[in-house]
Image (cartoon, rainbow, N blue to C red):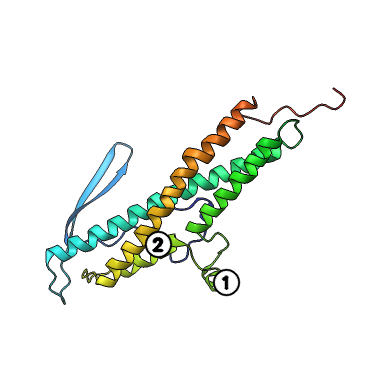
Amino acid sequence: GITKVKDNVFVQGADYRGHQVAPGTYTARLSQGDQVSEAKIVVLDPPDINVPKALWEQQQDLLKRIEDDINNMHEALNISLDMKDKIQRISKEIEPLDDMDDLQEGAKGLAKKMDNWLNSIIELRQKNFQDALNWPAGINAEFFLLRGNLDTYNPDVPKGYQDRYQDLQTQWQSYKMAYDKLMAEDVAAFNELFKSKGLPALGRPIEKKEGL
C-alpha cells in the first residue's frame, strides 16, 4: 500500500492500495501471532494480448518508482503537518511570556514557509472530488493520476506517460530540495532559538506572574 496523508486529508484520485502485479507466481501469507499460513497464487498472462516479459518489467518498475515518490512525498507532508501543529502550539503557549518577541516572529515566519511548501505539494482545501473545480489538485494527485493510468493489464507504457513521469519527477526533486533546506536551515534555526529561551520541552511554560 501507500502512505496516507495524516488526518485522512482528501487527495484527488488517491488509491492507497498496491498496484496490479505482472503475470507470475506469488505467495500469499496470512499470519496471526506465531501461526503462518501460505498459499501459492499464479497470475496468468492476459489471453487476448501477447506481451514480452520486458514490457511487464518496464511497467512494474515505473509503477514502483511512482509509488516510492508518493511515499516519500507523503512522509515529508506528514512531518511538515506535525511540525506546523507544534509551531502553532508553541506560538500560543508563549503569548503571555516576556522577552519572546523574537521567538514569536520566528514561529510565524517558519509557519509561513511551511505553508508555502505544503501548498506546493498538496491542496489542503479540497474535501471531496467536486472541490477540484475550485482548487486544482497538488502534485501528489498528479502522481496518483499517472499511476492510475499505468496500472492496467496492457503494460506497454506510452512515451507520453514516460515523459510525464520525468516532468513530475523533476518538479518533485525541486520541492524535495526545498524541503531539505527548510529542515536543515529554518527548522534548525528555530530549534536553536527555542532552546536559547530555556523553555521546557514538555508541557506549558510557566506563565508570567503579574506584579513581580
Q: Residue sitting at 48 percent across and 50 percent down? A: 77
For residue 14, above or below residue 48: above
Amino acid of disc 2: Asp
Q: x and y percent of residue 123 in the render?
A: 53, 61
Where does the N terminus fall, quadrant-wise? bottom left
> Depth check: 4 or 29 in front?
4
Residue 1 visible in the picture: no
Q: Which quadrant would residue 210 be assigned to in this image?
A: top right
Residue 86 shown left or right of residue 16 in the figure = right
Give the residue number, with chain letter if any, for mark 1.
134
Instruction: Find numbered disc 1 in the image and state the secondary structure of the residue it sits on.
Output: loop
Mark 2 lies on a secondary structure that is loop
Image mark for residue 148: none
Q: Earlier in the sequence, mark 2 or mark 1?
A: 2
* Callout count: 2
Look at label 1 and name its amino acid: Asn
Q: Nearer the viewer, residue 63 or 199?
A: 199
* Mark 2 Cα shell of 10 Å, populated few (<14), some (14-19), many (≥20): some
- In the displayed orientation, state which residue is furthest to the right: 211
Q: Which mark is residue 15?
A: 2
Q: Is residue 107 left or right of residue 138?
A: right
Q: Position of residue 194 (x, y in %)?
A: 61, 31
Q: Dot 1, how many residues are within 10 Å of its Cα: few (below 14), some (14-19), or many (20+)?
A: few
Residue occupying image coordinates x 50% and y 50%: 6
